[in-house]
Amino acid sequence: MLLLQKHVLLLSLRPRATSALLAFRHRCLFSNTRFAATAAAVAASASPAPFAVADYLVASCHLTPAQAVKASKVLSRLKSPSKPEAVLAFLSDLGLSDADVAAVVVYDPLLLCSEVDKTLVPRLTELRDLGLSPSQIARLVLVDPARFRRPTIISKLQYYVPLFGSFENLLQALKYNSYLLSSDLENVVKPNVALLRECGLGDCDIAKLCIPVPRLLTSKPERIQAMVARAEDVGVPRGSAMFRHALLAVAFLSEEKIAAKVEFLKKTFRWSEAEVAIAVAKLPVVLRNSQERLLRMSEFLMSEVGLEPEYIAHRPAMLTYSLEARLKPRYYVVKFLKENGLLKPNRSFYTAAQVSEKVFVDKFIRPHKEAAPRLAEDYAATLKGEVPTRFRLQEPRTGLNSI
């Protein structure tokens, strides 16, 4: 009987114990969930925000917001400022200003991803070994930072510096065309140099030719061969003193454009085919003068000064002088002196036109200080575009080749 009572008592207590156990387990589960959520929130607040490349470029590299957005598109792999900071320190040590750094980053954003110790410092050492100063290296970086990162720049400089005569000459050419540093030396540049040497040009001539037009080195050899042929076709033979100038004049001009310019010269200056050939042989660059300039020159030299076509063809250098700052002011002086008996009638205008400014003043202005006290003042006024009344000319006479 006693055992039966105990059993009944246990059965009555079991639901209460089970209910309490379930409640305890629920409280534990809720606590664990809250703990996990709290831990996750703490971890999230502790992790750094993603690296904002565009903001960094504005703040540290001095780019404009628009430049930064554009540059950031190629810098998506940057996850921290560690590499850019090292690169910026390297550029600062080279002596680049904030403006220089901004220009470099805009030109070559990927420079910020460079390994300073593995790429930039070794390149710096190699360039110093070539004899470049820190300031020269800095200027090279400004010209083409992308090529600066590549090891091939060393062999290119080893070839180009002797060819151009100095690093400064090479730098001038690079400012016109930095593609020199990426061109194929063996298959493009060296064959072009060999051809130019065959034409009688020395390295000094090649440098003078290619500093303003470096594409003469980087264009395909077949194209340079065609240019050489066109220079010969305008009447300037290989090996002549003017061949370099002829090559420069016809570079990148088609045969059609050259033919059109020859026809224009014949019409404008009333030249024969032979006279055009004479003028071009003496001054190949006349082929590159604009039609407007040539028209104004012909109107002044032929209509106002009264020079004959043949006279001009044999003295085409006059076509290179400034009309407003040289030819007109000097002509007014010469005309004034002749009209007042202060200069021999047979003294040629070309003589006055071709000398330097100092020589012109010494020979045509100062000797007449007493006879024409206002001559220097009037001449100075013409250089500014003014024409004093005493310099006004009568109707020009034609055929005055001695003027």
Image (cartoon, helix red, strand yellow):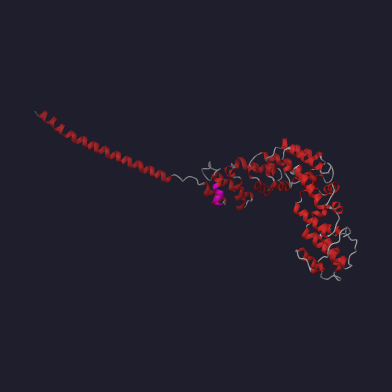
Q: Which quarter shows the C terminus?
A: bottom right
Find residue 75 and report its horizontal and vertical position in percent: 55, 43
Residue 306 falls in which quadrant of the image? Answer: bottom right
Q: Is residue 201 visible?
A: no
Residue at 79%, 69% in the rendered image: 389
| Residue 322 against residue 220 in the figure, above or below | below
Assign the magenta stretch its main secondary structure.
helix
Q: Left of 144 or right of it: where is 83?
A: left
Find residue 161 and report its horizontal and vertical position in percent: 74, 43
* In-front residue for pair 40/362: 362
Find residue 8 and report its horizontal and vertical position in percent: 13, 31
Tell me if residue 204 is in the magenta stretch: no
Residue 297 falls in which quadrant of the image? Answer: bottom right
Read off the magenta span.
64-69
Q: Which quarter shows the N terminus?
A: top left
Q: Left of 308 or right of it: where is 168?
A: left
Find residue 336 and report its horizontal and vertical position in percent: 85, 66
* In-front residue for pair 175/295: 295
Tell me if residue 66 is in the magenta stretch: yes
| Residue 261 against residue 341 in the figure, above or below | above
| Residue 1 against residue 355 in the figure, above or below | above
Residue 108 falls in which quadrant of the image? Answer: top right
Q: Residue furthest left?
A: 1
| Residue 353 against residue 182 in the figure, above or below | below
